[in-house]
Amino acid sequence: MPSSPRIPRVSAPEFPSGMDWLNTPRPLSLAALRGRVVLLDFWTFCCINCMHVLPDLAYLEEKYPDTLTVIGVHSAKFSNEGETQQIQKAIDRYGIRHPVLNDRDFTVWNAYGAHAWPTFALIDPEGNLVGMASGEGKREVLDQAIDSLVTHHRSNGTLFPSRLPVPKKSDVSSLLHFPGKLDIDGNRVLVSDTAHHRLLLLDWDENHPETARVREIVGQGSPGFEDGSLSQARFRDPQGVRFDPRDPLVAIVADTGNHALRKIDFRTRTVRTIAGTGVQGWALFEPSPARTTLLNSPWDILFLDGSLYIAMAGPHQIISMDGKEETLYPVAGSAREDLVDGAGDQAALAQPSGLTTDGSRIYFADSETSSVRELLPGPTPRESRVSTLVGMGLFEFGDRDGDFQIARLQHPLGILWDDGLLLVADTYNHRIRAIDPKNREVVSLTEGRSLDEPSDIKKGRSVYLIANTNAHEIVFLLPSSGGPVLGKVDILP
């Protein structure tokens, strides 16, 4: 990204007509935005890297409110992401306040020569494309380039400050707002109320699965990073939650947006950080102190053999923490985003987002490769082994049952070991699937679009609960001879 506007003038390609616009009362054009700096963000809502840059964009929008227009160009990787209504839900989930264009056919992407998510294109107040950059960590260079353009065009008389209308925040009247993950312990259910930045502890009776009652609200409900009492603590986009099998009055939370692990003690009614610092890091390749190591979007967690395993979506790894909560260890993932099996230190994962176990092996939903994979943990990453059950690669996805070789999933986020089967929240196909490792086949348990981007599934004694994320609800699933029965859990305050 250039730091000076004195470069050859190249007109930025105009937006085509007839495309769907969101977060704006009318379609926008570069011609109408003359006099302002424009920053295009090419993104797709599944992408963890695209999520990571949203705070940078918000920072720039706040710093340059009258002179900068950010436009999200949503060029979808997955077919589900190309649907305008699903993009709107992602906008609401992430709290995006700038206009977004649905570039479902990659028309704008190709016109600008984008090649990765995210990619940024900077356009000056005269409509010239002055630079492009890809990847995370570009806040400083973008800030410098925007400041240089603003200074130059203000002195040149070609900057005309103005403000675009700010869209209204989504009105969600339900108790939950994009719930991400859940866990069950007897008659207690812990739910990550992700977009409300809090956790809900529910009382729930399997004999009457259609209702639950809020026992505790953990967190203030506004984004932040703060330990303290249950009511004082603050979280940011929490995802994975687990009751501690050693002490059911304790639960661990993957505080994804804070890049941290938090411990909830319902006995002392406190929350404290046990790993991470609140600052995003990168990959882990050697044992490191838990409370000073920078984590990167932990998405799910799992207890096994006295250790806590963590699906690190950001660096495409699975790591572990010892039972004393002192040290983090690498387990699997080279930090290269791909689908490569083999030894843990050589295997490539792609945004692992759900964990489960049969008691010895770990199975995980590897969302960006639309796959379900198996991890046999060893004493070192080199002695761990990763293999793939279902899935073929980063751009191989679909909605198909059958033998492992032909079955296709689409960005699964949740997974549950259930008496010889793996139940998968096949998120972008809006259904629950059963994977049979022994017979090597995949079968759909729910039909059509009876769910909306489900992100997790857990089991009580015989009843299943599903985080039906985009519908802002928890759904119960009852096995039946005529097929599974779905119903909404009515959560009472």
Image (cartoon, helix red, strand yellow):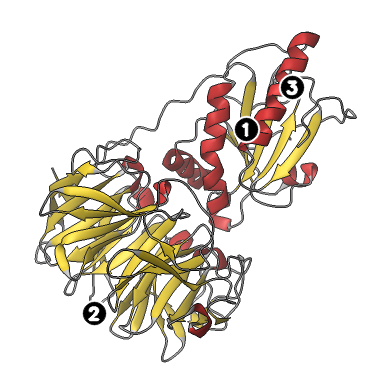
Which is more toward the observer, 478 or 423?
423
Which is more toward the observer, 116 or 478?
116
- Marks 2 and 1 sit apart, C-alpha to C-alpha, by 50 Å
Which is more toward the observer, 181 or 224?
224
Residue underneath mark 1? 71
Residue underneath mark 3? 149
Task: Tell me the SS state at disc 2.
Answer: loop
Marks 1 and 3 close (CB-CB < 8 Å): no
Image quadrant where one finds the N terminus: top right
| Residue 13 visible to the viewer | no
Q: Is residue 392 left or right of residue 433?
A: right
At x 23% / y 79%, what residue is drawn? 481
Q: Which class describes the residues within 10 Å of circle 3: few (<14), some (14-19), or many (20+)?
A: many
At x 79% / y 24%, what residue is drawn? 127
Q: In which quarter of the view is residue 223 placed?
A: top left
At x 43% / y 83%, what residue is drawn? 378
Q: Give the amino acid type for the residue marked by disc 1 in the picture.
A: Ile
